[in-house]
Amino acid sequence: MNSITSNTVNIAITGVGGQGVLTLSEILARAALECGFNVRVGEIHGMAQRGGHVVCTVRIGKNARGPIIDPGFAHLLVGFEPLETLREINLVKQGGCILMSSHVQYPVAVSMGHSKYPSHEEIIKNMKKYTDRIIEFDALELAVKAGSTQALNMVMLGAIIGTNLVPITKEVALNVVRTAFPKKFEKINVNATKLGFEMAQACKK
């Protein structure tokens, strides 16, 4: 176990309302508890509006006494969408890790022509001002492969475990996923978690 794990791991998770950010945070926290770790979970921005900006925080470890992650203190920034990830780039510590789905979901303002979505190159360039450790893949594509677009958040869960930055084993995470959803959705979510794990492991090589 590394020094980060033995103290506290700070994870910020961001996306769009309706993508399952909060569910991911809750399942990640449950898995950490199953592994015997102290956990704190918080919402920075509300979940009330579908399609709105969402940020949740998960802090795992003995020094996690509250849910707030100050700017520059997240070991891992998890983004369900490129622009939403960039919005919270200030949370990641210098040299920290970004785990991001590359699938673009245009904000309402962009869809209506009121603003411009930055290019992928611009987004990555701005992220690299903070860290070069960027794991990027199309999580929605993997969710579809698993059987449902709704499994996007479980793809990201598997990828989080696959980074090896959190003190949670793949086996424990899968067991929590199996009990977190109705039986008819179990196979899809388990498969999504496995696909995310495998992708993150492959991207690290």
Image (tube, rainbow, N blue to C red):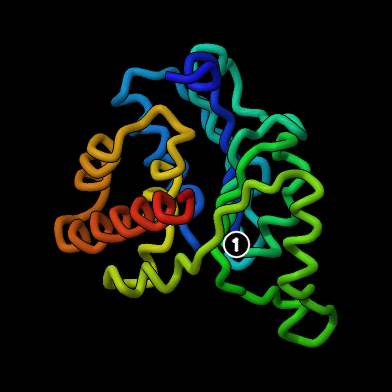
Vertical side of 12 occupied by 185: above or below = below
Q: Position of residue 118 (x, y in %)?
A: 79, 73
Horizontally, residue 39 falls left or right of residue 193, namely right
Q: Nearer the viewer, residue 55 or 159?
A: 159
Residue at image point 60% right, 27% down: 67
Q: Position of residue 122 (x, y in %)?
A: 80, 67
Horizontally, residue 30 falls left or right of residue 110, namely left
The amino acid sitting under disc 1 is Val
Residue at image point 75% right, 36% down: 94
**Disc 1 crowd, CA 10 A, few/some/many (<14, 14-19, 20+):** many
Q: Position of residue 93 (x, y in %)?
A: 72, 34
Q: Quadrant of the N terminus?
A: top left
Q: Which residue is mark 1?
A: 16
Q: Position of residue 170 (x, y in %)?
A: 29, 40
The image quadrant of residue 116 is bottom right
Residue at image point 40% right, 27% down: 167
Vertical side of 42 occupied by 66: above or below = above
Vertical side of 25 occupied by 62: above or below = above
SS for dot 1: strand
Q: Nearer the viewer, residue 45 or 205?
A: 205
The image quadrant of residue 147 is bottom left
Q: Residue placed farthest to the bottom in the image?
A: 113
